Image (tube, rainbow, N blue to C red):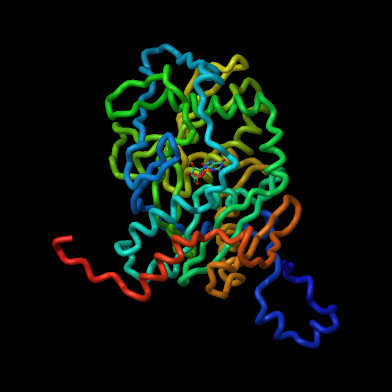
Amino acid sequence: MESRGTKRGAGKIEEAEPWNKLLLPASSLPTDPALYVGPFPFYRRPSELGCFSLDAQRQYHGDARALRYYCPPPTNGQSPNFDLRDGYPDRYRPRDEEVQERLDHLLCWVLEHRGRLEGGPGWLAGAIVTWRGHLTKLLTTPYERQEGWQLAASRFQGTLYLSEVETPAARVQRLTRPPVLQELMYMGYKFEQYMCADKPGGSTDPSGEVNTNVAFCSVLRSRLGNHPLLFSGEVDCIDPQAPTTQPPTCYVELKTSKEMHSPGQRKSFYRRKLLKWWAQSFLPGVPNVVAGFRNPEGFVCSLKTFRTMEMFEYVRNDRDGWNPSVCMNFCAAFLSFAQNTVVQDDPRLVYLFSWEPGSPVTVSEHRDAPHAFLPTWYVEAMTQDLLSPPKTPSPKD
Ligand code: GDP
Ligand code: MG
């Protein structure tokens, strides 16, 4: 492994060869919010290209079988009383977090749909493919003070793929997660069970198991500045009563948070949590986040809907608040940085972008294991296409 920038000559040599600076991509990217203040960049209205589901065994299905239906309790003046700790740990089947899935499920969808992507056959070659969650982390980076990240990047047939790598610190945190935190994670999923039915017009069933292997993922197309994007994100539910039934506008994100009792608690909620909620839902164009506020005993006694497009209003006049333009401008700058760094087209070559709070993003080069993340089945199937291009589908197909 070789770290970029470590082989640079002393300043004197660089002065003698100023062309170096013009030809070499930058070796790091700063993240200070002040550097990204400016107009909001272009962001194409996200459109849904398709979806897929993961079942109770974490198996992929190219359909919406895992999609659930928003089913809030009746608004008859009574408050909800959801016991989020019910079923823990007996009716909890947590996903095995040791399994590093990387982009695999998304690549499965891309492989299945590559011949009929809107934007034409060349569109994918100019796009960035990643998970929504990775883009969320980029959006919040200028304001993040606790958790760093690592993103692996490879170029293949023109497309830039971005896949997160668990940092050593994140791994330690996960393996030593205190029992209260494990229960809090469960409570977030339990809330979904109280708020969702398996069928439109159906009822909720809080007596069942909470199995976090199950997921419904929407696959979206957008563009940030000049970066076409294909990304996928897990969607909690669809609102069958939404004004429009067109995804992603009919989707609802569900969240839980601690009940707030003081102005200080609210301020901190707007500054930290709403930033994460906004970034996660703004990217795929999910218009509403329904929050369940839990008391210290773990009961949700109140619900509040936050409109994604109005979340910024809570911090607009806060000097220590966040700014959507900064988030999006930084993300655009990172995507340009990655595009300019990952020049060679080679699925076995990986650039690892690393970031820790208080430092700029740095990059190192790697080949093959352990960082290469594009699976052989994907690379081989995509390469076969070039050798024997698929026939133009006939109207009968
Ligand atoms: P999110 O925005 O962070 O929830 O992540 P995405 O919606 O982009 O999810 C992408 C994929 O990663 C889906 O298959 C999720 O089920 C899965 N996923 C979500 N959260 C986690 C996590 O904390 N760890 C791992 N390994 N996978 C996750
Ligand atoms: Mg959620």
Q: Is 322 or 180 nearer to us in this picture? A: 180
- Look at the image and tell me whether residue 287 can be seen: no
Tell me what residue is drawn at x 63 percent, y 20 percent.
261
Furthest toward the left, the residue is 396
Residue 343 on image: x %, y %: 57, 74
Is 182 left, or right, of 61 in this rendering?
Answer: right
Q: Is residue 171 left or right of residue 186?
A: right
Question: Is 291 displayed left or right of 319 in the figure?
Answer: left
Name the residue: 62% across, 32% down: 269
State the quadrant of the N terminus. bottom right
Q: Quadrant of residue 71?
A: top left
Count of marks, rendered view: 0
Which quadrant: the C terminus?
bottom left
- Percent coordinates x, y for residue 367 in the rendering: 63, 67
Given residues 303 and 137, the one toward you in this image is: 137
Q: Position of residue 169 (x, y in %)?
A: 72, 45
The residue lying toward the viewer, choosing from 242 and 317, is 242
Residue at the image point whose x is 53% and y is 19% from the top:
90
Q: Nearer the viewer, residue 175 or 227?
A: 175
Q: Is residue 284 above or below residue 97?
A: below
Residue 326: where, in percent of width, then height? 60, 54
Question: Residue pushed farthest top?
Answer: 78
- Please determine whether, in this image, residue 387 is positioned above or below residue 313: below
Asked whether the viewer can see residue 183, the reply is yes
For residue 340, above or below residue 278: below
Q: Residue at x 53, y 46 (%)?
A: 279
| 240 to 81, vertically: above or below | below
